[in-house]
Amino acid sequence: MENAFVLELAESKFKDLFFCFCGYAQCEPLHAYGLAVRPNYVLHYILEGEGFYQIGDRKYYLGAGEGFLIEPDTLTYYQADQEEPWSYLWIGFSGRRAKEYLEDLGLNSLHLTFCSDQGSEFKRLILQMLKCSDGSITSQYQLQSLLYAFFAVLSKDASDSGKDLKSRENFYVERAVGYIRNYYSSEIKITDIANYLCVDRSYLYKLFQNSFQMSPQQYLTQFRISRAKELLSTTTLSIEHIASSCGYQNALVFSKAFKRKLGCTPTVYRTEHGRAVRTKLEADHDFLEQLMKDEVLHKRKQL
């Protein structure tokens, strides 16, 4: 369910690019639309909250400041988040050059999402469109001009393609690293990360090489081993428990990966580094005790 304000135009006198409808909605938790096919293009822009947009097996998790493109004759589904349901605005359009104009903005079948900090301007334009509801020739020309204004505002984020590409790459890398941090203890695979981001594995590999000079698999392994080192040094958990906590269901596989990375087994690492950690903790404890004693003596002298 959603609280929506909608304007729809029955027909248009324009051909290259023309307005079809627009709207603004505050969605209830888990409000969904689809599975559905639209006869025209639709751009959604998220003002607040979160949700996801799905086309086939591609699922995009989006939030405020992001948007998505629905293409004609494409089966799509989108749904508001349960905890933070989104509020969004949308504009539908068509025309024989609509695809070309979208390409100017960097939007196509391979790039269906976008980011923009022009939310207040988008909302202002949509609210102006909603006022053009009398069907007059004047309103049709106003709607057409506002549609081009909407494209002009959106083009600001596509004007510097290099910067836009870098921003998109950083966005994907941050999402990928966040996914690894959240799910490294599970049996995740690189395909799981790629599917979460809706990108192919080769592109994900390129992103990690550019950012970390290592593959996604190497990053995942390094993260797991780093977490294992911490647990080995500071806890008395069994090797089997630590292996499971770090995403290895087989302790032998974990031990081989650990030795391949550090040159020693988990048991040897615990013996050497656990002693060093304990020594440091004991030294810190003795130091704090001495400080407390000195403080007590200082207060007694003052009395």
Image (cartoon, helix red, strand yellow):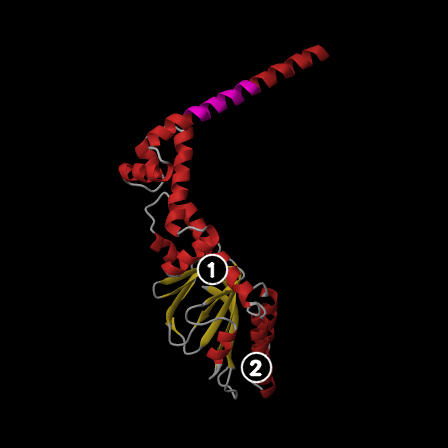
Q: Position of residue 301 (x, y in %)?
A: 70, 11
Span of residues in magenta: 275-287
Q: Position of residue 190 (x, y in %)?
A: 35, 53
Whether residue 158 is in magenta: the answer is no
Residue at 34% x, 32% y: name it: 266
Q: Position of residue 222 (x, y in %)?
A: 40, 43
Q: Secondary structure at mark 2?
A: helix
Which quadrant, please, contains the N terminus?
Answer: bottom left
Q: Secondary structure at mark 1?
A: strand
Q: Which residue bears the numbered disc 1? A: 62
Residue at 56% x, 74% y: name it: 151
SS assignment for the magenta stretch, majority: helix
Q: Which residue bears the numbered disc 2? A: 144
Whether residue 280 is in magenta: the answer is yes
Above or below for 293 versus 87: above
Q: Quadrant of residue 235?
A: top left
